[in-house]
Image (cartoon, rainbow, N blue to C red):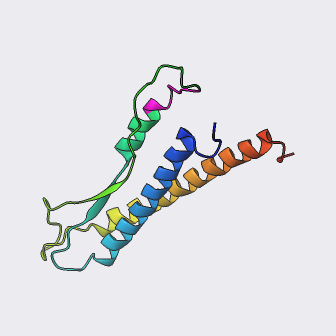
Amino acid sequence: MNLLHNDKMTLMENALNASALRQKTTAANIANADTPGYKAQKTVFQHQLDEEQARLSARRTSDQHVHFGEHSNGQAYVTENRATTFNHNGNNVDIDKEMSSMAENQIYYHSLIERMNSQFNSIRTAIGKGR
């Protein structure tokens, strides 16, 4: 069993990558808030994360155990909202919403970092280095 590459660590790694992509996407939206015709982008990941977390309860510790299906790659992706127009110039960026999203994402990212640090500390303690 590989302690560093288990389902939980992979899920947290994907969540950190998605959060970084969300930060980049939100920053691009804010930077283009006054660009005529620019359409706000959104990073999609949370529903995939929820699905993966639901699957984590069934684990195989041996090849002889019942197989519970494959995990998806859990990758985040960016979508563009072309259905709305928020400003008279064809732009649909709501700067207040984007700033709120950025703050929320920062809190989410830091909570993931704390959880990952906790996992590493647990591993360190398990191998006797965390006394």
Magenta residue span: 54-61
Residue drawn 51% across and 27% down? 57
24 up-or-down from 14: above or below: below
The reply, left or right, for residue 127 in relation to residue 83 is right
Residue at x 72% of width, y 43% of height: 123
The spot of residue 55 in percent (x, y) is 44, 31
Quarter-of-image position of residue 81: bottom left
- 122 is higher (above) or lower (below) than 20: above
User: Which quarter of the rendering shows the N terminus?
Assistant: top right
Image coordinates of residue 41 in percent, x first then y, are 27, 63
Write the residue at 79% across / 42% down.
125
Indicate whether residue 55 is drawn in magenta: yes
The secondary structure that dominates the magenta segment is loop
Q: Which quarter of the figure is the C terminus placed in?
A: top right
Magenta stretch containing residue 73, yes or no?
Answer: no
Instruction: Residue lying at the far bottom in this picture: please name it.
Output: 35
x, y (%) of residue 79?
25, 58
Going 52% across and 20% down the picture, which residue do you hit?
Answer: 65
